[in-house]
């Protein structure tokens, strides 16, 4: 199994293509081997110069080890365990290798080139053999909406006997300008989805994995329901929980997501059941959260609003329909999310869409053009920022942009124990760097308010548990009158 990732330096860029080595945390000048439970993964660079650099991940699968490594709940012995295509085809094993060998890159971590890790770069990904059940058009349907140009060429069953027709394997080439972390998360989720047969037993932690890895792009993906069903091998109970949680990330109801035509699915062991909409069902947490944020924006009388970390734009879409908001700016570090947001905005009438501007940017870097707004929203964003970068975000939002009000929502970690199918100790999304209790959030908010001159009040969002509070916690910061940005700056230096 072979995967190559190539990157070319755009003209005039200040970085070298060999910086791919920093992003992948693998030195281009040597070959490295990683022992895996199912064989050996090797990383090497067939080419590495300033203009173009290619990293290759080669998996040598040991089919016997693969079978011996199996644990409880594995199917009975069968010849298929020993005689199969696993050594040759890119599959869920390759996804596992991506997460173990390129784990930091997959999570977007890169101490040496942090800005490059957050930048969309020209990438080309090649896989000589990918099992793609359902036909090559499925590769197009899952990768193209994410910004890839897809070439999926069917491989003949046997080149010597063209009459036999094509196999269900394709040679897959993806080109696009994306963040490396996004690209790897696409492969991590979608290669097993195209393959349709997982090599390991599924349990509820798979839901967490899917939602964590697909967090920035799955909620807005047109094939999200099919992807979810295939990823979870159509285990009905898991699919239900995953669709419900996905709906919380987006504004669709789970029924809407579940109601897909999955006649294309050729997985034999399906236990399909269609999801019946429940009458009188309460609104999802995502809907309640947006309502709470819009309510808080109205309460502070905001008209020009920043949606910082806007993601695929669910809140933006709601803000544009409300005439109280005259100017709305969405900012996000993820190009992919912004593309989805843009596509959604295109469907709106012009008078609504023209009030919104989308900008790519990292909130941990100050940006003078974000100054002078009435309010900024950080909805489910702070928990995505490394604890040691949070101070930089506070400075850029509260210190530099310094809007009249800041509305922050974040998960209440105390509530997690009430979620069905959620593994204790696991965060709600893979990209979360922390999740806070109510006391931790209050400590942070009071400290930030004091430092930058904001009063703060708190509001629970979503159904409330007597002991554990509500699922989402919201803080509404309002700037003390008479405090200017300059004073904030000097506060910061301890001079005021
Ligand atoms: N606010 C949206 C999306 C929340 S997901 C909603 O509630 O639906 C978190 C978002 O924050 C992601 O889209 C992620 O790309 C973005 N993000 C994380 N770190 C960021 C940073 N440093 N700068 C800008 N955006 C960031």
Image: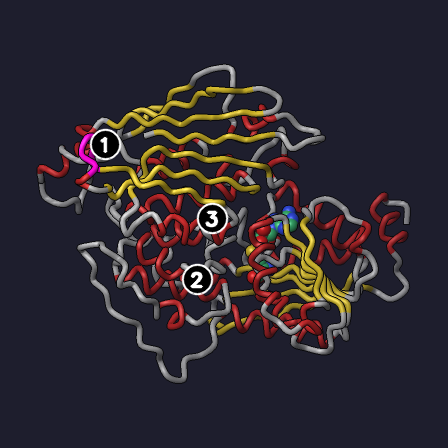
Q: Report the residue at 63% width, 48% height from top.
A: 333
The span from disc 1 to disc 3 (Cα, nearest Å) is 43 Å
Using the image as rendered, state which of residue 32 and residue 227 is in the foreground.
Answer: 227
Is 138 located above or below residue 44 in the figure?
A: below
Dot 2 or dot 3: first in sequence order is 2
Dot 1 or dot 3: first in sequence order is 1
Is 448 located above or below residue 131 in the figure?
A: below
Q: Is residue 76 magenta?
A: no
Q: Report the residue at 60% width, 55% height from top.
A: 338
The quarter holding residue 290 reads bottom right
Query: Hey, which residue is sitting farthest top in the picture?
Result: 30
The residue that mark 1 highlights is 159
Judge whether residue 374 can be spotted in this image.
Answer: yes
Which SS type dominates the magenta stretch?
loop
Q: Nearer the viewer, mark 1 or mark 3?
A: 1
The residue that mark 2 highlights is 246
Using the image as rendered, state which of residue 6 and residue 119 is in the foreground.
Answer: 6
Task: Tell whether 31 sits left or right of 111.
Answer: left
Task: Tell whether 43 sits left or right of 194.
Answer: right
The span from disc 1 to disc 2 (Cα, nearest Å) is 43 Å
Q: Are marks 2 and 3 in contact (CB under 8 Å)?
A: no
Using the image as rendered, state which of residue 383 and residue 286 is in the foreground.
Answer: 286
Residues shaded magenta: 157-162
Q: Position of residue 456 (x, y in %)?
A: 72, 65
Q: Nearer the viewer, mark 2 or mark 3?
A: 2
């Amino acid at each position: 199994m072979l995967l190559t990732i190539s990157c070319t330096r755009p003209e005039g860029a200040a970085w070298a293509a060999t910086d791919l080595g920093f992003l992948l945390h693998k030195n281009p000048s040597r070959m490295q081997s990683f022992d895996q439970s199912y064989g050996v993964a090797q990383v090497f660079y067939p080419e590495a110069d300033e203009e173009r650099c290619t990293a290759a991940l080669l998996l040598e699968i040991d089919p016997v080890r693969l079978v011996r490594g199996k644990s409880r709940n594995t199917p009975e012995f069968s010849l298929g365990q020993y005689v199969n295509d696993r050594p040759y085809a890119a599959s869920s094993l390759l996804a596992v290798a991506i997460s173990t060998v390129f784990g930091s890159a997959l999570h977007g971590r890169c101490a040496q080139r942090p800005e490059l890790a957050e930048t969309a770069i020209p990438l080309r990904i090649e896989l000589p053999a990918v099992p793609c059940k359902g036909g090559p058009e499925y590769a197009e349907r899952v990768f193209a909406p994410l910004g890839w140009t897809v070439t999926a060429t069917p491989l003949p069953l046997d080149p010597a006997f063209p009459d036999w027709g094509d196999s269900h394997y394709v040679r897959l080439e993806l080109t696009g300008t994306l963040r490396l972390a996004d690209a790897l998360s696409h492969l991590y989720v979608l290669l097993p989805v195209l393959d349709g047969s997982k090599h390991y037993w599924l349990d509820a932690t798979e839901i967490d994995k899917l939602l964590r890895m697909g967090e920035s792009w799955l909620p807005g993906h047109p094939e999200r329901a099919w992807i979810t069903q295939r990823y979870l091998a159509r285990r009905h109970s898991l699919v239900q929980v995953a669709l419900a949680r996905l709906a919380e990330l987006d504004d669709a109801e789970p029924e809407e997501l579940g109601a897909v035509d999955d006649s294309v699915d050729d997985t034999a062991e399906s236990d399909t059941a269609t999801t019946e909409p429940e009458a009188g069902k309460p609104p999802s947490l995502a809907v309640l959260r947006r309502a709470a944020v819009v309510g808080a924006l109205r309460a502070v009388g905001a008209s020009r609003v920043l949606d910082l970390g806007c993601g695929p734009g669910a809140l933006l879409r709601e803000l544009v329909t409300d005439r109280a908001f005259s100017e709305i700016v969405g900012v996000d570090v993820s190009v992919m999310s912004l593309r989805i947001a843009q596509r959604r905005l295109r469907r709106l009438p012009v008078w609504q869409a023209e009030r919104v501007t989308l900008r790519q940017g990292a909130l941990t870097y100050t940006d003078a053009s974000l100054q002078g707004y009435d309010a900024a929203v950080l909805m489910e964003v702070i928990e995505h920022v490394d604890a040691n970068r949070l101070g930089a975000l506070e400075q850029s939002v509260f210190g530099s942009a310094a809007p009249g009000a800041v509305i922050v929502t974040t998960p209440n970690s105390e509530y997690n124990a009430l979620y069905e199918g959620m593994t204790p100790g696991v965060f709600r999304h893979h990209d979360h760097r922390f999740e806070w209790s109510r006391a931790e959030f209050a400590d942070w908010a009071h400290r930030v308010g004091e430092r930058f001159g904001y009063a703060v009040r708190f509001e629970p969002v979503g159904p409330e548990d007597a002991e554990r509070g509500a699922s989402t916690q919201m803080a509404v910061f309002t700037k003390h009158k008479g405090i200017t940005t300059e004073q904030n700056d000097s506060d910061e230096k301890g001079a005021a």
